[in-house]
Image (cartoon, helix red, strand yellow):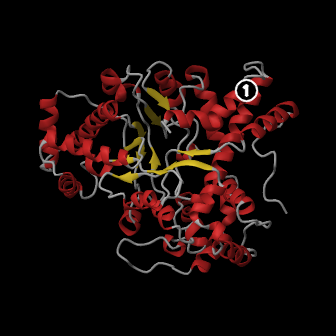
Amino acid sequence: MALLDPDRLFPTDPAARGLARALHAEVRGLPIISPHGHTDPRWYAEDAPFPDPAQLFVVPDHYVFRMLCSQGVPLTDLGIPRTDGGPTETDGRRIWRRFAENYHLLRGTPSRLWLDHTFETVFGLDRRLSAETADHSYDLIADRLAQPEYRPRALYERFGIEAISTTDAALDDLRWHRAIRASGWKGRVLPAYRPDSVVDPEFPGFRDNIARLGEITGCDTLDWPGYLEAHRQRRAFFRELGATSSDHGHPTARTEDLPQAEAAALFGRVVAGKATPGEADAFRGQMLTEMARMSLEDGLVMQIHAGAWRNHSDSVLAMHGRDKGFDIPTRTDFVRALKPLLDAVGMRPELTVILFMLDETTLSRELAPLAGVYPALRLGPPWWFFDSPEGMRRFRELTTETAGFYNTVGFNDDTRAFCSIPARHDMARRVDCAWLATLVATGRLGEDEAPEVARDLAYRLARKAYRL
């Protein structure tokens, strides 16, 4: 039994469906550019077999386990480690059985489409995951994972990945990236500079992180010019290992462009631990503008992921740590918040700032008009809760009329779940082909133009925007 409908996500109108099929045939085999994500560079450096199906599909993927958590399944039953080292399930088969018996909870979600796509096309499963098929699927996948062609480098090549960027903390020594380079393997795995831990005064251990930044760089990071110089040095180190982008995850899109004397005074209060919450937010905003200026110097593409209340559950944060599916969208003001940065650098076409949103109400009202006029701005693809068929379709509907296609940057998968990468890109390509077919069918795009736009959205825009 096939798990996948070959016409999934295409229009129901026969004529438009035929156009979508033809467009998808043009792009389905294009290489994958994965310019922002969270796969572990150690996988590619060591090229060791993945441990078991649970460690591959369940434990690292908050898209999966957050849904089970919402129905009362304890995260410890799914093998999610505890920060205190306390007991959690470690038996991969038991974790898989718990996942399989709750697989129905993912009906109608993009995660279900990604998983079914992976199960069928990568591992050859022909029976839907359930309590009844749990052991069969576990054994089949485990058997495949023991084979050389299912190791990380082989899968990278099988998936047709041309370049993949990880997301790495500013203090990371990038040892695994250095090991990849030293190995002689030709796969392109690039770091991305993520400085949140040393620019967010409310980040756990911020003061110690600043001290560590100074130790690594030899700069006086308690001094404002020394602190900025330390960032320049770290960015240069990341660039030496192939980085083309930086990434900034802030609770708001607030930016500031304070006179340097005021910025230095604010920094002094921050490092002394005397900053108010408002001042902490102002400092994060100042650092976005400083990072934009550094991008003008070194060429790194700047990504801003704003508008998430990170780690919303205090109890889950305390027991399991960060990034466990409890980042929740909030209302975000981009027009006022970005103005200081845009006044400073927004008209510089050599700068690329990619904006990601979690507040969909901003798409047509704020983000598309901003990207439709400022040379430095581009719109990132639907992110997290909206990297879904309906979210992707709404993104095109709400942004294309104002920003066009060429002020967007294609698609990125933003995932820790390695095997879902081709599935996610296939979903995006199908949704975009469906949208283009609709434009052609309604006389808004020439049929001769649609294949070129489809290739741009699937491949070329991401490659160009991220300077890959």
Front in this rendered view, residue 340 or 70: 340
Residue that carries the numbered disc 1 in the rendered image: 450
- Name the element at disc 1: helix
Front in this rendered view, residue 33 or 333: 33
Front in this rendered view, residue 44 or 253: 44
Where is residue 150 shown, x and y percent of the image?
64, 67
Image-quadrant location for residue 320: bottom left
Where is residue 455 shown, x and y percent of the image?
67, 33
In the rendered view, does 21 fall on the left or right side of 366? right
Query: Dot 1: few (<14), some (14–19), or many (≥20) neighbours within 10 Å?
Result: some
Q: Residue furthest front?
A: 184
In the rendered view, does 144 fall on the left or right side of 126? left
- Residue at position x 50%, y 57% in the image: 39
Where is residue 457 shown, x and y percent of the image?
63, 34
Q: Is residue 306 visible?
A: no
Image-quadrant location for residue 429: top right
- Residue at position x 41%, y 30% in the image: 334
Q: Is residue 158 visible?
A: yes
Front in this rendered view, residue 36 or 77: 36
Image-quadrant location for residue 375: top left
- Residue at position x 56%, y 20% in the image: 402
